Image (spheres, rainbow, N blue to C red):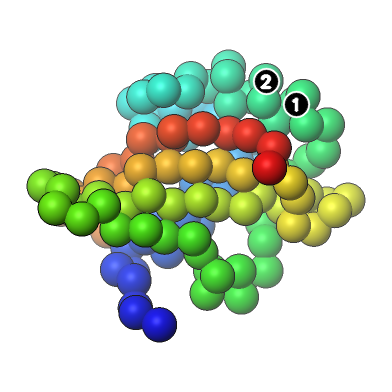
């Protein structure tokens, strides 16, 4: 199994923490509102009807990451399974494009929030 850029994990944890805290404004600011706004994120999670929580640490070893070949700057497509207090791993997932940039965290575009 190929190792992934450690910034992918850091960026995913940042997203999970803010979503679990209900801080959709911070997520919108971080993603610059590309594709999904704060209100769309909030509505999608509210419609799901469960409270998000942080997943166990071991989940970071199971991220669905696909490198976008030939992209410049480097990009990855990432599906993040979201967890709830009632269900554990839920059917709700966040699909994102992570984009290489200087610094500890990658740039993020939220592509979709949906039930699998």
Residue farthest right in this picture: 86
In which image quadrant can residue 94 be found? top right
Q: Quadrant of the C terminus?
A: top right
Residue farthest top in this picture: 39
Closer to us: 37 or 96: 96
Q: Is residue 32 left or right of residue 24?
A: left
Q: Quadrant of the N terminus?
A: bottom left
**1 above or below 115?**
below
In which image quadrant can residue 49 be found? top right
Q: Is residue 67 left or right of residue 44?
A: left
Residue farthest front in this picture: 69
Q: Which residue matches tag 2?
A: 43
Q: Which mark is residue 32?
A: none
SS state under label 1: helix
The crowding category of the residue bearing disc 1, from other C-alpha atoms within 10 Å (few below 14, some 14 to 19, many at least 20), is few
Q: x, y percentage for residue 46?
A: 75, 26
SS state under label 2: helix
Residue at the (15%, 48%) spot, across then down: 71
Query: So how many labels did they put on this image?
Result: 2
Q: x, y percentage for residue 106?
A: 29, 50
Residue at the (11%, 47%) spot, across then down: 72
**60 above or below 70?**
below
- Rounded to the nearest angstrom, the CA distance separating label 1 from label 2 is 5 Å
**85 above or below 8?**
above
Q: Which residue matches tag 1?
A: 46
Answer yes or no: do the residues labelled 1 and 2 have beta carbons within 8 Å?
A: yes
Residue at the (20%, 55%) spot, across then down: 69
Residue 26 can be seen in this image: no
Residue at the (26%, 52%) spot, across then down: 68
The crowding category of the residue bearing disc 2, from other C-alpha atoms within 10 Å (few below 14, some 14 to 19, many at least 20), is few
């Amino acid at each position: 199994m190929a190792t992934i850029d450690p910034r992918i994990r850091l960026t995913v944890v940042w997203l999970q923490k803010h979503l679990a805290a209900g801080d959709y404004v911070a997520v919108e600011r971080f993603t610059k509102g590309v594709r999904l706004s704060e209100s769309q994120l909030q509505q999608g999670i509210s419609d799901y009807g469960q409270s998000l929580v942080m997943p166990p640490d071991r989940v970071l070893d199971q991220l669905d990451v696909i490198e976008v070949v030939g992209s410049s700057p480097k990009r990855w497509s990432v599906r993040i399974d979201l967890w709830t207090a009632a269900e554990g791993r839920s059917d709700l997932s966040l699909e994102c494009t992570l984009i290489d940039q200087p610094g500890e965290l990658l740039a993020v575009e939220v592509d979709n929030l949906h039930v699998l």
